Amino acid sequence: MRPGELDAGHVERWRELRALSGAPANPFMEPEFTRAVGRVRPGARVAVVEGRGGTVGFFPYERGPLGQGRAIGFGVSDSQGPVLNPEHTLTAGELLRACSLASWEFDNLEAGQTLFTPYATQEFDSPVIDIGQGYEAYETALRAGSPKFFRTTTAKERRLARQVGEVRFVFDERDPAALRTLMEWKSAQYRRTGRRDRFAKEWISTLVRELAAGRTPGRTPDHAPGCSGVLSVLYVADRPVAAHFGLRSRTVLSCWFPAYDTGFAKYSPGLILHLRMAEAAAGAGIVLLDLGRGAAEYKDALKTGNLRVYEGASVRPGPRAALYRLGREPSRRAHSFVRNRPKLAGYAQRALNQVGRLRDR
């Protein structure tokens, strides 16, 4: 069915199955995210798996014209996979065949997804911040594990206040202008670093705006939907200098699109924002901040541990499988070759930065 056809009973059962999985309540794995993608991606579908006693699973995916399948929201979703009763007896081939899919590609498969993990070709760390014991406990651990980082960041925040103006943080900002500013900063960052601007894709920018607009003020954590947008903004003298838009469930905040005003780079406003965000999130009942796959110095400094995510594809035998491999495997292998060689990855990053500088001329 199309995601918009999921009814209240489906949503309730989806949540029950997610609870049975024992996995962190990542908002990308919730029905609200699948529904939101369904409004902007015409190929979005959900397979409802029936068994003895009723519904035993859901499989959200996007289908291409030749039966190529991808994870729902592929390219921007940070946690992927079917939602199944742990006692299911399905195989990957059976599920793909029932959906008329020749293949199913993933780039952030959730750890514990035993149905598709055997088809992973790459495994990645996804750094996390555990604030389950409260922000004070996290700060104590941060002072002990990264003392220089913590001292430097907090000193920059004090200097920012002295030299520019009052520092103010809003965890759940509702001003649409702040979201527009964040998206402009992020697009500029993509161009500056030679990367593809995600917000140049209409479906991605529309998805973000819809998830931001769909927030319901006044919802308590116990009654909040499984996936809702959170826009956090750091202001200095009432001017935004850093912002982040992410998705939250009742207990997990997935960090998605952070950016800052480069005019304030010497103060590291993005790092200040993340510390303030961790403090506010702990106060809002969140126990885990998922910083997302990808290496970055700030993630190494902030994190308390890592989750695992996987990249790869399950491909059914047949002529369409050959088309998939011909179209996708060469680029996948090239990316993997570069990522696994730090020196070569450094050359690639410098080349991307040069592309970014040329774009801005």
Image: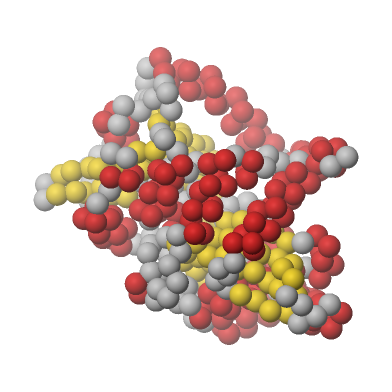
Measured along the vertical axis of the image, is residue 296 above or below residue 92?
below
> Which image quadrant for residue 122?
top right
Q: Hey, which residue is sitting farthest left in the picture?
A: 53
Q: Is residue 267 left or right of residue 112?
A: right
Q: Position of residue 153 (x, y in %)?
A: 76, 75
Observer-nearest of 229 and 273: 229
Give the colour scheme shown: secondary structure
Measured along the vertical axis of the image, is residue 319 above or below residue 267?
above
Q: Hey, which residue is sitting farthest top in the picture?
A: 319
Q: Position of residue 53 (x, y in %)?
A: 11, 51
Observer-nearest of 337 and 291: 291
Q: Residue at x 55, y 68 (%)?
A: 174
Q: Quadrant of the N terminus?
A: top left
Q: Position of residue 286 (x, y in %)?
A: 47, 73
Measured along the vertical axis of the image, is residue 347 above or below residue 14?
above
Q: Position of residue 31 (x, y in %)?
A: 35, 53
Observer-nearest of 195 and 142: 195
Q: Residue at x 62, y 60 (%)?
A: 179
Whether residue 59 can be seen here = no
Q: Residue at x 34, y 62 (%)?
A: 22
Q: Residue at x 75, y 49 (%)?
A: 188
Q: Is residue 238 left or right of residue 177?
A: right
> Which image quadrant for residue 116?
top left
Q: Quadrant of the C terminus?
A: top right
Q: Is residue 74 left or right of residue 62?
A: right
Q: Report how many numbered discs are placed on residues in the image.
A: 0
Whether residue 196 can be seen here = yes
> Which image quadrant for residue 37?
top left
Measured along the vertical axis of the image, is residue 54 above or below residue 129?
above
